[in-house]
Image (tube, rainbow, N blue to C red):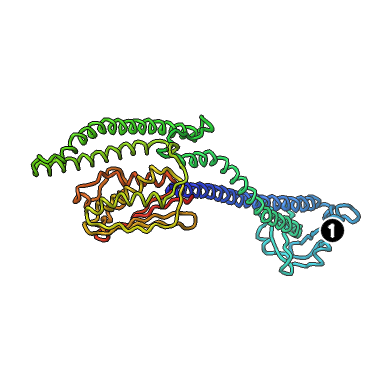
Amino acid sequence: MGHRVYHQKNGGLMLKLIKTRMTIFSTLVVFILFITFGAFLYFGLDRLLHEQFDRQLYLLADAIEDSYGTDQGYFTFLEAGTNNYEQARNNWVRIVDPSGGIYFQSDRYRDDPVAFPLEAARAHVGRKPKYFYRNFQIDREKDYRSIILAVIRDPEAGALYWVEVGEPLKHINNSLAFFRKLLLASLPLVLITVAAASFYVVNRLIRPVSLMANRAERISFENLNQRLPVINYKDEVGRLAITFNNLLQRLEASFRQQRQLLSNISHELKTPLTVLRTHWEPELSNGNLPQELREKLAGDVEELARLSKMVDDLSLLSRSLEDLSNLERQETDLTQLLSQLIGDLRVIAELKQQEIIWQPPPTIRVGGDPRYLKRLFMNLIDNAIKYTPEGGRIAVTCAEAAGRVLVTVVDNGIGIPAKDLPRLFERFYRAENSHQTGKGSGLGLPIAKWIAEAHLGRLQLESAPGLGCTVTVELPAW
């Protein structure tokens, strides 16, 4: 049961880890997409604003350039009193002649004077397009952008004038700064929303798997009749549940056949063994029987007794594969049960000059089936007697603490090699040094462990070669 609880906790942690990883992954993907898309929008907006800005500069400069008439010798766009003139005055407009002299200059340029790039303007003459843009600063804080357009009527004569129209980039910079702040401010909100939505969606997707895992963790050979829930027959999770249920069905049939086989074997062997013991045991008291034949017959009777016990173990083993609901759980005086059992087993121990140390504690009660509990402790103490040499000692203690009852069986026998410890609870497995005694069937400890776990307890074993063995049974107190 302890392993089952561990696997349930471990399985739950794995599912939580999967949900967390998927949530983090989806949030990270959205974060990358948000940054990428935000950068795309930002630079797209930057380009769009600058294109519109440059277009406005060009339209005004082109209108001024078109208004120049060679016959009149001046720019009609700049005639005083017209709307165009007022527009030019209120913008950054100036007109420069080929020598660099100022033909016209709006008030804005007077307030923030900046040198005209005459050499660059002359170098650009003859190129297409006949205008170019430049960026410049005033007081290292104000960013400006202007267009310089050449007024050319006769290409051979060169430029008559240069029209420069400029505007501060303040509005563009403010718009871009606002957009950056908007992106940064919305990023946490977007990530939180995506994380919550991802967790919800992932939880919905993982929920069928979680239900299947929880149900699967509760299924063992004791309840193979249970099946996993199938929420959707059409998706992959549903098909997985159906496949697993089919596997459980085959396992259930296999265990049923195994139980039936063990039951049949024990039933078929029990009757002839009983008949043989009934015939041979009375012969041991026959005074006319030769001593040599008597010893041989005694050995045969002992072997029959061992086989009979093995058959009983097989019968109990077949029942251990069934549902645990057939256990008769009731209040049981464990102190009295152990005292009676130890009293019976002392007779066997005394034949090997062994001492069983037992100090009965005050009444300790547990909930369980007395028949199975007696078999549990009989197997453990009987094993201690078998594998403890003549003259050895076996100590049995029983104590209650924190709602749990601990029964310990300690011997100073031959001990168990470390390599055999992990397999001791496998059915029919016998440790290498146990073959020296020629006793045991390899069923005692597996049955004892099954009985302990069937009573919501556990069985632990510690041993080393030459240092004996310590077996501890932990059961819930009544």
In the picture as drawn, the residue positioned furthest to the right comes out as 81
Q: Can you identify the residue that label 1 sits on?
A: 90
Residue 462 is at least partly visible in this image:
no
**Picture coordinates of residue 92 (x, y %)?**
79, 60
Residue 261 located left or right of residue 54 = left
Residue 321 sits above or below residue 160 on the image: above
Q: Tag 1, which secondary structure?
A: helix
Say what amino acid the circle numbered 1 marks.
Answer: Asn
Q: Observer-nearest residue: 348 or 373? A: 348
Q: Position of residue 160 (x, y in %)?
A: 75, 57
> Is residue 318 visible from the viewing direction of this image?
yes
Q: Which residue occupies the foreground of this view, 100 or 308?
A: 308
Quick check: 395 left or right of 159?
A: left
- Residue at 38% across, 42% down: 371
- Position of 129 with respect to 240 (left or right) is right
* Picture coordinates of residue 67, whole percent (x, y): 81, 51
Quick one: which residue is furthest to the bottom in this view?
A: 139
Which picture quadrant has residue 284? Answer: top left
Identify the residue at image location x=69%, y=49%. Answer: 48
